[in-house]
């Protein structure tokens, strides 16, 4: 019996095959194995929308920046994001105040 991959949306390990698609009973997401093999991890914002390099995102919560006294306020717009290779939980970006930020996607939404 072959191993089924984890769900790309929620990371659940209970995925099963149904009519040629893989399905996740935890979140209801369905995907094909061909799509999973062809693409890397899908980066999704806090609302589940897929993110791509160059997108604009908005901070949904006040975030303290480690190593400085600056706080990124809720509603701060961050343009031209870069995806971190093989990491679906982080993005790289620049802010007006800070250069070279690494942000968790759970605190961002697509603008």
Image (spheres, rainbow, N blue to C red):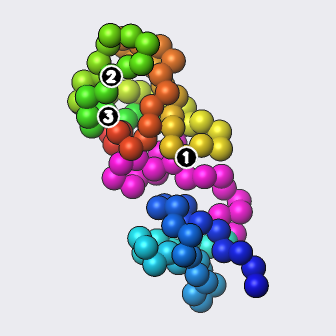
Magenta stretch, main secondary structure, is loop
**Could you give the CA–CA distance between mark 2 and mark 1, rounded to whole angstroms?**
21 Å
Between marks 3 and 1 in the image, the one whose residue lies nearer the viewer: 1
Neighbor class of circle 2 (other Cα within 10 Å; few <14, some 14-19, many 20+) is few
**Could you give the CA–CA distance between mark 3 and mark 1, rounded to whole angstroms?**
17 Å
**Secondary structure beneath disc 1?**
loop
Vertically, is 3 above or below 85?
A: below
**Secondary structure beneath disc 2?**
strand
Residue 24, image x, y percentages: 50, 75
Q: Which of 34/5 is in front? A: 5
Residue 7, image x, y percentages: 54, 66
Stretch in magenta: 34-53
As drawn, the label of residue 64 is: 2
For the N terminus, the quadrant is: bottom right
In this picture, residue 55 sits left or right of residue 83? left
Badge 1 is on which residue?
88
Q: Earlier in the sequence, mark 2 or mark 1?
A: 2
Q: Which of 14/49 is in front? A: 14
Badge 3 is on which residue?
58
Q: Earlier in the sequence, mark 3 or mark 1?
A: 3
| Residue 110 visible in rendering | no
**Secondary structure beneath disc 3?**
strand
């Amino acid at each position: 019996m072959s191993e089924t991959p984890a769900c790309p949306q929620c990371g659940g390990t209970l995925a099963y095959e149904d009519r040629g698609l893989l399905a996740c009973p935890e979140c209801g997401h369905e995907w094909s194995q061909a799509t999973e093999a062809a693409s890397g991890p899908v980066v999704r914002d806090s609302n589940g929308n897929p993110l791509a390099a160059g997108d604009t995102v908005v901070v949904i919560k006040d975030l303290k920046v480690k190593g400085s006294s600056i706080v990124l306020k809720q509603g701060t717009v961050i343009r031209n994001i870069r995806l971190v290779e093989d990491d679906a939980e982080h993005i790289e970006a620049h802010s007006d105040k800070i250069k070279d930020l690494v942000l968790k996607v759970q605190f961002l939404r697509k603008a």
